[in-house]
Amino acid sequence: MKKVMLGNTGIEVSIAGFGVLPMGPSQLALPMEEGAAIIKYAYQKGINFIDTAQYYRAYPYISKALEDGGMDDFVICSKSLSDDYDGMMEAIYEARQELNREVIDIFLMHEVRHGQLEERAGAWEALKDAKAKGLVRAIGLSTHHVDICMAAASMDELDVVFPLINYAGLGIRKGNQFATREEMMESIRACHDAGKGIFSMKAFGGGSLTVSYQEALDYVFSQPEIDSVMIGFGKIAEVDDLLSYLDGSMAKDYNPDVSKKKVHINHEDCEGCGSCKNACPAGAIYWGENGLAEVDHEKCLTCGYCSPVCPVRAVIMY
Ligand code: SF4
Ligand code: SF4
């Protein structure tokens, strides 16, 4: 697979990356050997870039995949939701220990929302110190927010940005409003022009765009400012689909079978706002004991109406 330099970091990555979230305990909870085998398979096929996070609890899959060696150019990105100095530093030490690596290639502030750059200044200081000490090679942030992505363009010490972008504009935020894909692309362009490395997330909008598989990929892979596109994988067949898309051998009318996928609410992200419940034509969303949304799969029509209205992309399909 084609490799590119990630902005000015000096880190070379494949144009498609491996998002490890789907295989982890919050989604498919794959057995350790099975998850590690998919990572190794993808690496053998040229995908040398993996995205994980402290809260995905997926480090064991990666360390298992790395156990046998031979993956020297494997680039690991992790991130933490911590907002203070100590929490971020602990997250970096935890990643180094659990991934059995002296240096983590990329470490990010995870999902920075509108107004949080100031609130999470302690975490940012920790990232800068960690880079100065050689614990990480590159630092940055992930975000769904246009205004945060735009601000990242003028953060001198920031090396990389991991923004949400997809052809339907699902889940893109600006302040407390929804924003368009064009607005997000404008901020991505500003980051790219400032020399930041860009890898994008949620090309399939959390699963609801997978029915338009090639259209979704055409959009993100045609943006020259995006160095690499992070795709979540939970099966070897999904890696094969991407490979055949990229090498041009995929039939033009092919779309993956998503009939067995179900809609889920990620309680790490859900804010209990009720937008999904209001949008559901089947009365399939109810409040769980923790005050957050739940899906009744007996009633759910998998129509996907709940997904675009969620402000935090907590509605996912897998
Ligand atoms: S997919 Fe449709 S039926 Fe199912 S929970 Fe969402 S809106 Fe309701
Ligand atoms: S729209 Fe999203 S944040 Fe709001 S209740 Fe539904 S899942 Fe939770």
Image (spheres, rainbow, N blue to C red):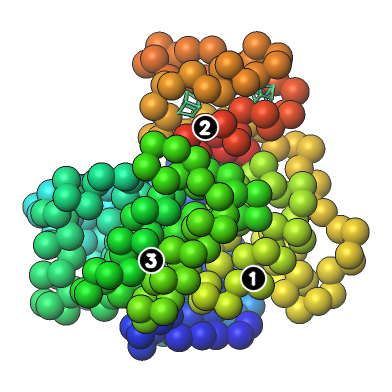
Q: Secondary structure at mark 1?
A: helix
- Residue, x 59% and y 49% (percent of image)? 169
> Which of disc 3 and disc 1 is earlier in sequence?
3
x and y, in percent, of residue 162 in the image: 42, 62
Q: Pick whichever of labels 3 and 2 is earlier in the sequence.
A: 3
- Quadrant location of the C terminus? top right
Residue 171 visible (yes or no): yes
Provide residue 120's location: percent of width, then percent of height: 18, 50
Label 1: which residue? Answer: 221
Q: For the residue with label 2, is its CB less than 8 Å from the closest atom of ligand 2? A: yes
**Is residue 61 found left or right of 85 in the rendered image?**
right
> Looking at the image, is 302 positioned above or below residue 139?
above
Question: What residue is shown with label 2?
Answer: 310
Q: Quadrant of residue 248?
A: bottom right
Indicate the amino acid at tag 3. Val
Looking at the rendered structure, the kind of residue marked 1 is Phe
Give the x, y percent position of residue 78.
Answer: 34, 61
**Residue drawn at (65%, 49%), measured in percent from left and top?**
168
Q: Earlier in the sequence, mark 2 or mark 1?
A: 1
Q: Specify the label residue 161 is tagged with.
A: 3
The one nearer the camera, 234 or 264, is 264
Marks 3 and 2, how far apart in space? 23 Å
Left or right: where 279 falls relative to 274: right
Q: Position of residue 125 (x, y in %)?
A: 12, 62
- Determine crowd level at label 1: few under 14, some 14-19, many 20+ residues with C-alpha closer than 10 A: some
The three-letter amino acid code for the residue at tag 2 is Cys
Q: Is residue 22 above or below residue 267?
A: below
